[in-house]
Image: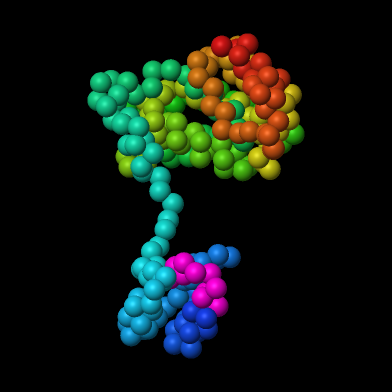
Amino acid sequence: IVVRDKSLQENIINGVEEQGTILGKTEKNLVAARLSSSKISELSAREGIRIGPLRLYKTLLDVSVTSINASVWWNNGFLGNTTVAIIDTGIDDTHPNLLNTSGGIVRTFYEQDFTDDNSTDDLNNHGTHVTGIVASSHPIYKGTAPGIGTLINAKGLNQLGEGNIVWLINAMDWAATEAPKTASVLSNSWGSCGNNDDNGESIEVHYIDSLI
């Protein structure tokens, strides 16, 4: 129920509670409730009130790749003939959707930890999630480049999903210049807290520019 006039919200809620069940409400003008058909008809007739079904929302993992028309590239043979480094919380290299490419070839993983976890394992799951977006070979939840044969796990964020600039720069530097097979693409799905980008003049930005 959307009550456009906030002054009516309390009155509406009181009326609903008498003839239905309040499931939740927002600070502003939205009320979720289970109502009888007669109460729905009554409220629908009132000015300034809009009623709609209570829809269930869920996570979606199969629309991002299609939204960028990745299949057009796949159909033309571009499945990921490159090496990608994931600068993140690590990668679960035993994950069934990451073990092999979409063509069934066993993937090669190069791994190095630069955090205080002392392990290349993904103890947070963010890095594995990001890697899935890049390279998952699942038939439905396929990554953008499912044919990538080599992934670099350059762990720069710890199990709390946090890291300092030294860890992250060391991770990027190793992946781009020192890994057994160096990366041509760096995936960096992280950012600093607050607005301290320094208008594009931060240490991080200058360092990444130096790698390109």
Q: Residue farthest to the left?
A: 75
- Say if the magenta span includes residue 2: yes
Which residue is at the front of the view, 20 or 76?
20
- Viewport quadrant of the C terminus: top right
Query: Looking at the image, which residue is at 42% across and 56% down?
Result: 58
Magenta region: which residues?
1-10
- Viewport quadrant of the N terminus: bottom left
Query: Looking at the image, which residue is at 34% across and 78% down?
Result: 45
Which residue is at the front of the view, 198 or 112?
198
| Residue 121 percent location from the top left of the image | 61, 36
How many discs appear? 0
Query: Looking at the image, which residue is at 32% across and 30% down?
Result: 70
| Residue 188 percent location from the top left of the image | 57, 28
| Residue 199 percent location from the top left of the image | 66, 24
Query: Looking at the image, which residue is at 39% across and 31% down?
Result: 144
61 w.r.t. 146: above or below: below
* Residue 13 seen in this snapshot: no
* Residue 5 seen in this snapshot: yes
Decide if residue 180 is on the left or right side of residue 74: right
Which residue is at the front of the view, 34 or 176?
34
Question: What colour-coding does the image apply?
Answer: rainbow
Q: Quadrant of residue 157?
A: top right
- Say if the magenta span includes residue 108: no
Q: Quadrant of residue 161?
A: top right
| Residue 122 percent location from the top left of the image | 60, 38
